[in-house]
Image (cartoon, rainbow, N blue to C red):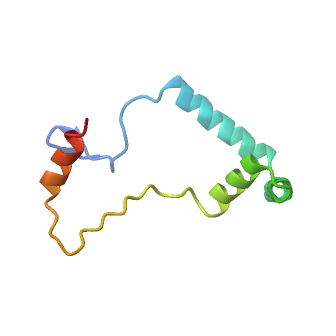
Amino acid sequence: MELNGGRRSNGGHSTKAKKPIDRRKNEYKEALKEAATVDDVVDVIVKLKEVAGTGDIPAIKLFLEYYIGKPKDSIDITSNGDTLNFKELIKFGYNKP
């Protein structure tokens, strides 16, 4: 690896040591990869879908979050043709009681 301004050019990878919790999570992920097959994962998803089909709200939420993805937070701003000054809008948000 070449040095760039005294720093290594390592493609954006952190040179910091991983926390013990991160290492443990990686170990758990590796163990799951070894223990489960694709068919096992499919079976779990099918069971989750069945439970969601009975009206179980947490199961429905979990199934849809994995199938569709979590919804993004959005803000609807309409100006009715007026111009918006972003700095004034930020000040307005900070001046609320």
Residue at the outermost top position = 20
Quick check: 20 above or below 68?
above
The residue nearer to you, when weighing 75 against 40, is 75
Q: Residue at x 73, y 46 (%)?
A: 58
Instruction: Give the quadrant of the C terminus.
Output: top left
Q: Residue at x 67, y 41 (%)?
A: 30
Q: Name the side, left or right, on which 63 lies relative to 97.
A: right
57 up-or-down from 27: above or below:
below
Q: Quadrant of residue 7?
A: top left
Q: Is residue 60 left or right of residue 96?
A: right
| Residue pictured at 86% horizontal, 58% vertical | 50
Q: For the view shown, which residue lies furthest in the bottom direction? A: 81
Query: Where is residue 63, by image quadrant?
Result: bottom right
Of 87 and 52, the residue lying toward us: 87
Q: Position of residue 86 (x, y in %)?
A: 16, 57
Q: Picture quarter containing residue 26?
A: top right
x and y percentages locating residue 54 in the rendered image: 86, 56
The answer to whether residue 24 is left or right of residue 90 is right
Measured along the vertical axis of the image, is residue 16 above or below residue 51? above
- Residue 78 image offset from top left, x and y in percent: 29, 68
Residue 79 screen position, x and y as percent: 24, 68
Q: Residue at x 63, y 56 (%)?
A: 65
